[in-house]
Amino acid sequence: MNERPQVLGVASGAVGLSALALVFGACCAAPWAVTILGVSGAVLLARMAFVQPYAVAATLALLGIGFWFVYRRPRPGAVCNVAQQRRLRWLVWAAAVVVVVMDLSSFAPNFFE
Amino acid sequence: MCWLTKNLIAIVLAAGTVAGCGQGSAQPTTNIAALDSADQPLRDDFDRDRSFVRLMFLVDPRCPTCLRGLADMGDDVLARLPKGAHVKVYVVYEPVIGGSEKDIPAAAELLHTTVARHYWNATGDFGRQMSQVLGYWSGSRWIYAWDTWMIYPPDAVWNGAHPPKPIFRMHQLGGLHGKFPFLDSKVFAAKLNAVISAANQKAAAR
C-alpha cells in the first residue's frame, strides 16, 4: 500500500501548524506584528494567541500519526517498498525535528519577560 | 514586455496614491508628554487629579499584547463607564521591544477616549521604578514593569520619590504567572466599578 500521500500530508500539516503556533507565540513579544499587520492586525493576532497551545498539541498528534504510518507493521501479503519506506521515515523524523524546534520556540517569549 | 512594465508602474503608482490617501486621512491628534527623570508631568497630573479614581497603564506601543490590553480596556472598561464618572486615565508608554513615540497615536486610538493622557518615557526608567513599587520580584530577578494595568483610589497621593502603590493591578507578564492577577478586562472593570462606588459612598457620607 502506498502511504506516501498520507505521510506527506501529516508531515506538512504538522510543520504548517507548528509555524502557525510559532507566529501566535512570537507575535506577542515581537514588534514585527505591528509593522506587518498594523495595530488592528496585531491586536487580532494577540487575541488569537490562545490558539497556540492547541496548535502545538495538534502538531504532536499529527507527528504521532506520521510515525504510526511509517512504523506500523505491514499487513500480511502487502507489497513493501523498502526504499520508499526508508525515505518516508527520514521525512517524518525531519518533520519531527522541525516541529519540535518550532514548538519550543513558540513558548520561548514566555521566558524572556 | 513594455505593456507589462507600463501596467506594473501604473499599479505601483496607484497603490502609492491609495497609501498616501490613507496616511493623509487625519487621525485625531494625541497630546504626548515626555516624562523627565522626576516623572514630571505625570507626577503633577496625578496629584492634581486627587479626588478622582485614577487608572494607570504601562505599555510598549508596539507590543501586540499591550495593544490588545489597550483595546480591551477601551471596549470593556472605558466605553462602559457611567457618564460623568470621576475617572482619569494615564498611559505611560515605554520602549521595551522597540516602540517609539511615533507609534503612540495609533495605540492611543484603541482606548476610544479623549480623557486619557499619554506619556512617553524614552529612558524606560519609569518601568524600573514601578517594578520596585509593585514588587515584581520573580524570585531571582526584578521583572520590568510593563503591560501592567493599575487602579488608584481617590485618596492616593504621590508624595515620595516613587509613585504610590495601586489598590489593584493586573498584568500580562509571563514571569509573574500566579503571583499577581493576569489581565482580564471584565474583572478589571468590575473592580473599577467597586472602587468608584466606594469613592462615591465616601463622598456622599461627608
Image: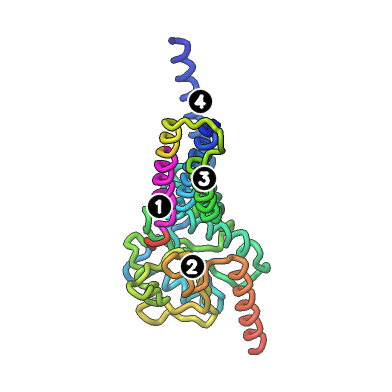
The quarter of the displayed image where residue B34 is located? bottom left
3D distance between C-alphas at marks 1 and 2 = 23 Å
Q: Nearer the viewer, residue A38 or A73?
A: A73
Q: Nearer the viewer, residue A22 or A76?
A: A76
User: Which one is in front in this view, the residue at disc 1 or the one at disc 2?
Assistant: 1
Residue at the spot x=37%, y=67% of the render?
B144
Q: Is residue B35 visible?
A: yes
Q: Nearer the viewer, residue B54 or A91?
A: A91
Assign a secondary structure to mark 2: strand
Tag 3 subunit: A
**Residue A68 circle label:** 3
Residue numbers of the magenta segment: A91-109
Whether callout 1 and callout 2 share a subunit is answered no
Whether callout 3 and callout 2 share a subunit is answered no
Q: Are marks 4 and 3 in contact (CB under 8 Å)?
A: no
Tag 4 subunit: B
Q: Position of residue A36 (x, y in %)?
A: 46, 42
* Residue at numbered disc 2: B171
Q: Position of residue B206 (x, y in %)?
A: 63, 89
Q: Going by the picture, which residue comes out furthest to the bottom?
A: B206
Answer whether residue A31 is magenta in the image.
Answer: no
Which kind of residue does numbered mark 1 sit on?
Ser
